[in-house]
Amino acid sequence: MADSLDQLAQRLQAFAQARDWGQFHSPKNLASALIVEAGELLEHFQWLTEEQSRNLDAVKKQEVAMEMADVLLYLIQMGNQLGVNVVEAAQQKIDLNDQKYPVDQAKGSSKKYDEL
């Protein structure tokens, strides 16, 4: 998966460079765009029940997929701008969460680590 994300990051960078959009891609602007796109993703689920959110029809699922893609692409662009490998950062975060949420204490619980 890392290879495919690296390839996606390179393709995305080439796409933006060809359009001279780098001038607009400050970390601040990308973080703002990421939040906007995350809001658009959430909008698809706003009034759905838990069950409805798990059983999207094909059209709605495709719309959600495109919003998920927007979120991912802005996150990758932020990584490019800041020199952060998002896959490595995610691996590190999982390692930290593994320490904060030991299986024997966290299994089946939604409590935050400091409440376990």
Image: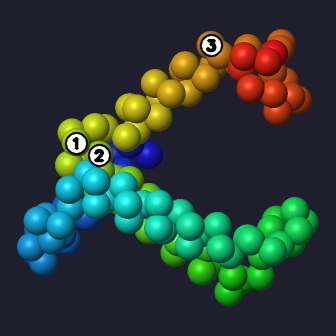
Residue at which label 2 appears = 79
Q: Examine the rendering and report whether any part of residue 69 can be seen.
A: no
Judged from the image, the secondary structure of the residue bearing numbered disc 2 is helix
Residue type beneath disc 2: Gly
Judge whether 103 appears above or below 31 on screen.
above
Using the numbered discs, state the Cα–Cα distance from disc 1 to disc 2 in whole angstroms: 5 Å
Q: Are marks 1 and 2 in contact (CB under 8 Å)?
A: yes
- Give the percent coordinates (x, y) of residue 87: 40, 38
Q: Residue at x 28, y 54 (%)?
A: 28
As drawn, is 103 to the left or to the right of 3? right
Using the numbered discs, state the Cα–Cα distance from disc 3 to disc 2 in whole angstroms: 25 Å
Task: Identify the mark at residue 99; answer none if there is no mark.
Answer: 3
Q: Pointer 2: residues within 10 angstroms few (<14), some, or many (20+)?
A: some
Judged from the image, the secondary structure of the residue bearing numbered disc 3 is helix
As drawn, is 72 to the left or to the right of 24? right
Q: Residue at x 88, y 68 (%)?
A: 49
Residue at which label 1 appears = 82
Q: Residue at x 18, y 67 (%)?
A: 24
Task: Tell me where residue 77 sits by quadrant.
Answer: bottom left
Residue type beneath disc 3: Gln
Q: Are marks 1 and 3 in contact (CB under 8 Å)?
A: no
Judged from the image, the secondary structure of the residue bearing numbered disc 1 is helix
The earlier-in-sequence mark between 3 and 2 is 2
